[in-house]
Image (cartoon, rainbow, N blue to C red):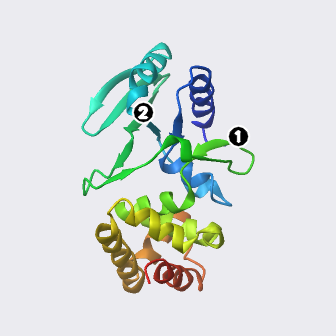
Amino acid sequence: MHPLQDELAEILAEAERRSIPLVVLGAFAVRAYLHEPDQRYTHDLDLLANADSLVSLREMLEFRGYTVYSSGPWWRAERKSGNERILIDVALGSVVDMMSFESYPLATNEAQLRAEPGGPLIPVPPIEDLLAMKILAHRDKDILDVVALLRDVGDIIQSEVFAMRVEMRDLEIPTRRGYLEIVAAIESGELARLWELRTGAPPPKDLLPTVRTALHRLFR
């Protein structure tokens, strides 16, 4: 069990009591779709809230001992817990990639409830949105998340829904750019190296070819 799971569960429960809709982003959203979630570790929490919920969310987090402040297009909450520091990054209405500054709007009412094995149900983005955001960002950790998601739940991803949700946000070009970068990382062997660094073992022989085929299908 991830050490931040209890904190996340308490925040979600308190938010529900206060009628503050939240969506879990980042590593915990990915973990909710994976068969072996412990391969995806993180040191912070990422949440999406509606812009009109910010005041209520800020009050809730401050009541829990967090200091809340603006951090560019995201908001950040920090709290000391013993020798550890808990960080929460909060997106309001849209998830902004800090490398490209591309914005991916998300609606809290479209969240789906999922749970990693042995964990509680949490509200996460639909798999097509989560995958699109990861491809859009395509940093090393995002590329590895794309591989893991396509490996574990590629069979539930609907290519038509994926294309529609990218198109309605007018993000076809930057998302395709991410797709080409990921394919290049597969073909150069860089992705195999990153996979081994994360998991401690080389990728199974058929994994990366299968992922490449799945990506081609999404961007055909």
Q: Quadrant of residue 12?
A: top right
Distance between mark 1 and mark 2 Cα atoms: 21 Å
Q: Tag 2: Cα neighbours inside 10 Å, few (<14), some, or many (≥20)?
A: some
Q: Could you tell whether 204 is left or right of 63 in the image? A: right
Labelled disc at residue 79: none
What amino acid is labelled 1 in the image?
Pro
Labelled disc at residue 120: 1
Foreground: disc 1 or disc 2: 1
Q: Which percent across, then down, holds residue 188?
A: 36, 84
Q: Could you tell whether 67 is left or right of 40 in the image? A: left
What amino acid is labelled 2 in the image?
Leu
Q: Could you tell whether 214 is left or right of 119 in the image? A: left
Q: Which percent across, then down, holds residue 58?
A: 41, 21
Q: Which percent across, then down, holds residue 56?
A: 45, 20
Q: Which percent across, then down, holds residue 31?
A: 59, 53
Labelled disc at residue 87: 2
**Secondary structure at numbered mark 1:** loop
Quarter of the image with the N terminus in it: top right
